[in-house]
Image (tube, rainbow, N blue to C red):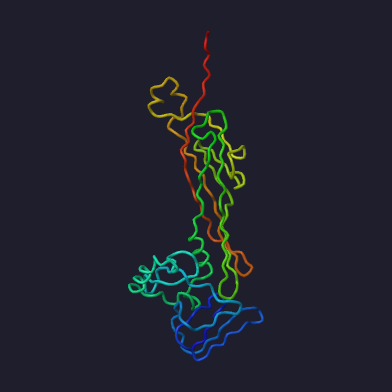
């Protein structure tokens, strides 16, 4: 005989029948099912464990493939966006073919220790969204001028704030936001800024002045003012990095996941304005 305690976040449908099943809420607010008898492999959609009070679990709508350490490549159902959406008829043939070709993942949604952890669910949500990469706006837009400031701006950036109620009625909230922006101006200097400094039209909040113009090799070698060019660069590689902080809130606690850095490099030409004295 085996006894398994299933906490609220891991309660799911179970296959087969049990000798006994006692589900109740503890004084601490945990919803617990104590099951005695033979514990079968739990697969999505099978009847069995009762949903916790306060509403049905989120529907297992998304069909996904993963690698199980025992059976290898296998499929499972999830309530987290990503994979194939079963509500879209265009995915029916692929889902049916996969079910016939691969095994289902053992214990994918139920048995503690074999199903996805809260960390894994949060990462799954995070991976299903696209975090913004830098797309800077320069002023002047085409090329800078030595001795004068070049300004940076950016269109509004969407942060991630996703929430879903898991079985048991506890909300999982996944968030991602930019904590810092790193700017490498391409001439050996760099600066750090906050997101509010960057978003909007180019302004003095983020600016830089270049000392040397950039030129082609031919210009540097053949033009009389080629010696005033940067010795190697045809344009400055301006590299901007968004430092995303990702984490989740679950059961009134905040857990920070691994930070994500997204980088974009833009080549920016810098010219020189030379005054010429003319005689009448």
Whether 28 is drawn above or below 213: the answer is below
How many numbered circles does the render carry?
Answer: 0
Q: Indicate the position of residue 96 as horizontal and vertical percent values.
A: 36, 72
Q: Indicate the position of residue 134 as horizontal and vertical percent values.
A: 51, 46
Location of residue 150 (image quadrant): top right
Q: Is residue 227 left or right of residue 54?
A: left
Q: Which residue lies furthest to the top in this view?
A: 280
Q: Indicate the position of residue 77 as horizontal and vertical percent values.
A: 45, 72
Rendered residue at 56%/72% (across/down):
166
Q: In this view, does 79 lie to the left or right of 207?
A: left
Q: Which residue lies furthest to the front in this view?
A: 89
Whether 249 is drawn above or below 11: the answer is above
Rendered residue at 56%/39% (across/down):
152
Whether 188 is drawn above or below 34: the answer is above
Which of 218 and 188 lies nearest the eye of the viewer? Answer: 218
Location of residue 26 (image quadrant): bottom right
């Amino acid at each position: 005989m085996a006894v398994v305690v299933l906490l609220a976040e891991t309660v799911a449908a179970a296959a087969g029948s049990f000798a006994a099943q006692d589900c109740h809420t503890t004084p601490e607010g945990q919803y617990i099912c104590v099951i005695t008898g033979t514990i079968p492999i739990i697969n999505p959609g099978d009847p069995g464990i009762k949903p916790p009070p306060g509403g049905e679990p989120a529907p297992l709508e998304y069909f996904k493939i993963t690698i199980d350490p025992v059976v290898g490549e296998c499929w499972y159902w999830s309530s987290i966006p990503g994979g194939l959406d079963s509500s879209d008829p265009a995915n029916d043939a692929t889902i049916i073919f996969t079910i016939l070709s691969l095994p289902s993942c053992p214990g994918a949604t139920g048995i503690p220790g074999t199903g996805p952890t809260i960390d894994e669910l949060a990462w799954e949500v995070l991976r299903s969204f696209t975090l913004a990469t830098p797309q800077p706006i320069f002023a002047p837009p085409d090329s800078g001028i030595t001795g004068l400031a070049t300004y940076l701006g950016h269109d509004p950036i969407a942060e991630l704030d996703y929430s879903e109620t898991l079985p048991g009625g506890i909300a999982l909230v996944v968030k991602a936001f930019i904590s810092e922006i790193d700017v490498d101006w391409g001439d050996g200097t760099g600066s750090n800024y906050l997101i509010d400094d960057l978003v909007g039209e180019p302004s003095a909040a983020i600016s830089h002045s270049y000392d040397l113009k950039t030129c082609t090799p031919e210009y540097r070698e053949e033009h009389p003012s080629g010696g005033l060019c940067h010795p190697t660069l045809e344009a400055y590689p301006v590299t901007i990095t968004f430092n995303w902080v990702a984490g989740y809130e679950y059961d009134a606690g905040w857990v920070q996941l691994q930070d994500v850095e997204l980088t974009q490099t833009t080549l920016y030409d810098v010219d020189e304005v030379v005054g010429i004295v003319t005689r009448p």
